[in-house]
Image: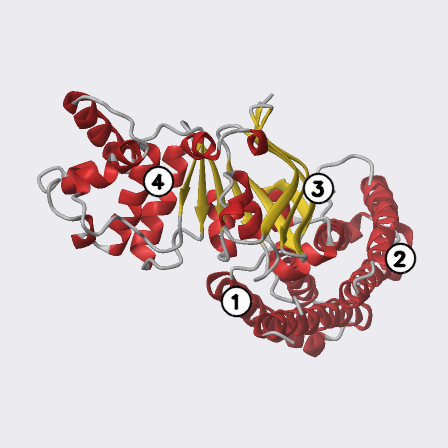
Amino acid sequence: MESTIIKSVDYNAYFGTNHVVKNVNIEIPKNNVIAVMGPSGCGKTTFLRGINRMHELIPGATAKGQILLNNEDVLEMHPIFVRLKIGMVFQRPNPFPNLSIYDNVIAGYKLNGIKISKAEKDRIVEHSLTRVALWNEVKDSLTKKGSFLSGGQQQRLCIARAVAMEPEVLLFDEPTSALDPISTSTVEELFHELKSNYTLIIVTHNMQQAARVSDKTAFFYMGELIEYDDTKQMFTNPTDTRTQNYITGRFS
Amino acid sequence: MTQLEKELQAVKSEVINMWSLVQMQLTKAKKAMLQFDQDLAREVLLKEKRVNAYELKIDRDCENIFALFSPVANDLRFLLAAIKINSNMERIGDIAEGIAKYILEFGSPFDKHILDKTQLLVMYDEAINMLADTRAAFENEDTILARSVFKKDEKLDEINLAANSNIASCIHENMESMNEALYVLSIIRKMERVGDQVKNIAEEIIFFMEAKVLKHQEEL
C-alpha cells in the first residue's frame, strides 16, 4: 500500500473574510503525481500555496485546519523548514537574472545561509541539472546567466533549483503555461522521471496535461474539493456531475 | 451547445441513419426471400455500398473528433461505443447482403414447410425487433430497453440450437429439399449472428450510458 506523504485535514484558507478554500480533506500518496484542476478562482492555487505556507505571505491571508507532512503539521513548523521539504515551481520561469546557471541551482543554499564545500556544490549542481535533463545542454556554460536559456530550459533550471534542496514534495503552479509545446512536452516527461524521487503536486488549467502526467486528479470548485480519484477514473467516468461538466467543457 | 456537442450529435444522427438503413436491408432481404423477389434482392446488394459508405464516414468522423477535441468521460465513452456499434452494424449489413445473394443463387422460392418447421421467420422477426429496440435505446439513451434484448437473443439461440435436428428432419422427409434446407440452415446461422451483433450493440449502449462493461460476462 502506498504511504501518505501529505494529508490535509479540514483545511480552510481565507483572504481577510473571503473564504477561498473550504474544509479540504485530501491524502496524497508518496511518489505520485497529483494534478489539481478547476476553474479560475476555485481555490486550487491557494490550496497549493497553503501546502508549503506560501499562502500566509500575502497580507490578510490566514489558514485553519491541518496540512500534515509525514504526519507533522506544517502549520506548526518553521516556514523555512517547510519550504526546504516542499519546494515550489511557478508559472513563469523565474531564474535569478543576475546569477549564473551554477549559482541559480545552489541559490537555495546561499539564501538560507547553508554552507557547503565547493566539491559538494559541484556535485549538487551536476546532480540537480542531470535530474531535470539539463546537464548535457548547459554543462559547458554553467557560468553564463540563467536568463540566457530558452523558456523551457529556464523552467527546468527552476526545477533543478528546487530539486537541489532535496525536498520530499514539489509543488508546481501551472508550470508549462508560459512554454511552447516542445518545452511543455520536455517538462511533462520530466514529471514522470521526477516522481520516482519526489511527490509532485501540479496545479494546471490544461486538462489534457492533467490526464497525461498525473496518477491522481483533484477537482476544485468554489473553494471545495469536489472529487479526488485516480486520473484514469476521473477522465473516463467521474462520479460528480460538476466534474463531468468541467472536463467535458460543459461548465457554465 | 459547444462545438464538440454538435460534432457528437452529428455522429449520433449518422449512426441512427445507418441503423435505419441496415434495418431496412434486413427487412427487404426477408421480403425478397418470402416473395422470391429477385429485383428486391438485387436492390439489397446495391444498397450494401451505402452501408459501407456510412461505416467509413462514421469511422472518419470519430477519428477527427478524437484528434481535434480530445474527448473525455461520457463523450469518450460515446465515441468508443459509436465506433463499435458502427462496426457491428456493418456486419449486419453484410448478413443482409449474404441472404440476398442466397435468394439469387438458389433461384426459386423457399418451401414454406421448411421455413415453418425451422422457425426461421420467428427468428428473423425477433432479430429485426431487437435491432429496432437497440436503435430506440441508443436514440433515447434508454438502458432498460437495451437490456431487454439480452432475453430476446436467448430465443434466437434456442431456435439456432434446434436448427440441426429440424433441418435433418426436413431432409429425411424430402431428400430433394436438401439443397434448399442447407440454404435455410445458413440463413438461420446468419440470424444467430445478427442476434450476437445486436447484443454487442446493446452492451455498447450500456457502456456508454453507465460506464459498465458487460462484455464476456456470463450473467447479463
Q: How far separated are the C-alphas under marks 2 and 3?
A: 27 Å
Judged from this view, the residue extending furthest toward the front is A59
Task: Establish whether labels 2 and 4 are both on one chain.
Answer: no
At 76% from the left edge and 63% from the top edge, which residue is drawn? B138
At 59% from the left edge and 72% from the top edge, which residue is drawn? B7
Q: Disc 1 marks which residue? A: B56
Could you tell me the amino acid type at mark 1? Leu
Could you tell me the amino acid type at mark 4? Leu
**Residue A143 located left or right of residue B15:** left
Q: Disc 3 marks which residue? A: B215
- The secondary structure type at the circle numbered 4 is helix
**Residue A78 located left or right of residue A166:** right
Task: Establish whether labels 3 and 1 are both on one chain.
Answer: yes
The tag earlier along the polypeptide, 2 or 3, is: 2
| Label 4 crowd bin: few (<14), some (14–19), many (20+), radius 10 Å | some
Q: Chain of mark 1?
A: B
- The reply to whether residue A79 is visible in this rendering is yes
Q: Disc 4 marks which residue? A: A190
Q: Chain of mark 2?
A: B
Q: Chain of mark 4?
A: A
Pointers 3 and 4 in contact (C-beta within 8 Å): no
Q: Residue B210: give x, y in percent of width and height.
A: 76, 51
Q: Nearer the viewer, residue A119 or B13?
A: A119
